[in-house]
Amino acid sequence: MDLQGCLEKGLIKKNLEAKNRVEKSLQIATRFLKAATRNLEIKEYDVCLITAYNSMFHACRALLFIKNYTERSHFCLFIALRELY
């Protein structure tokens, strides 16, 4: 699948208000990254993995928001980032 396919299926949507969500998404990404670091220090590897993934997800969403898109699919988020960046 490509970005056009994700758009056609509604899994990525154009949203002119998306840029307003960048800062909040970066704040969430930072919070999850800090949680991942704390969990790594206490050897809670399963929780560390989940929080690190959430951090990356929200950082990627911020990149998508900058381009005025929103997502409804983790897979299409990756596809969109690959094509947009």
Image (cartoon, rainbow, N blue to C red):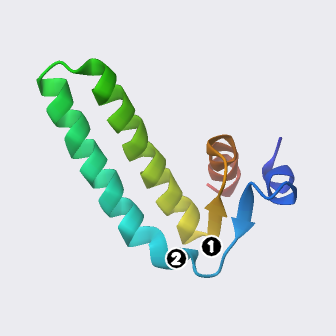
The furthest residue to the left:
42
Residue 39 sits above or below residue 58 on the image:
above
- Residue type at tag 2: Lys
Label 1: few (<14), some or many (≥20) within 10 Å? some
Mark sitting on residue 68: 1
Residue 21 sits above or below residue 35 on the image:
below
In the image, is 31 to the left or to the right of 84?
Answer: left
Proximity of marks 2 and 1: CB atoms separated by less than 8 Å: yes
- Residue type at tag 1: Asn
Mark found first going from the N terminus, 2 or 1:
2
Q: Which residue is drawn at 19% across and 29% down?
A: 39
- In which image quadrant can residue 46 be found? top left
In the image, is 62 to the left or to the right of 67?
Answer: left
Which quarter of the image is occupied by the N terminus?
A: top right
Q: What element carries label 2?
A: helix
Q: Is mark 1 on a helix, strand or loop?
A: loop
The x, y position of residue 85, in whole percent, is 61, 54
Residue 10 sits above or below residue 75 on the image:
below
Q: Which residue is drawn at 17% across and 18% down?
A: 43
The x, y position of residue 10, in whole percent, is 79, 59
Q: Residue at x 27, y 44 (%)?
A: 33
- In which image quadrant can residue 71 be found? bottom right
In the image, is 48 to the left or to the right of 18?
Answer: left
Q: Mark 2 points at which residue?
A: 19
Q: Distance between the residues labelled 2 and 1?
A: 6 Å
The x, y position of residue 63, in whole percent, is 52, 60
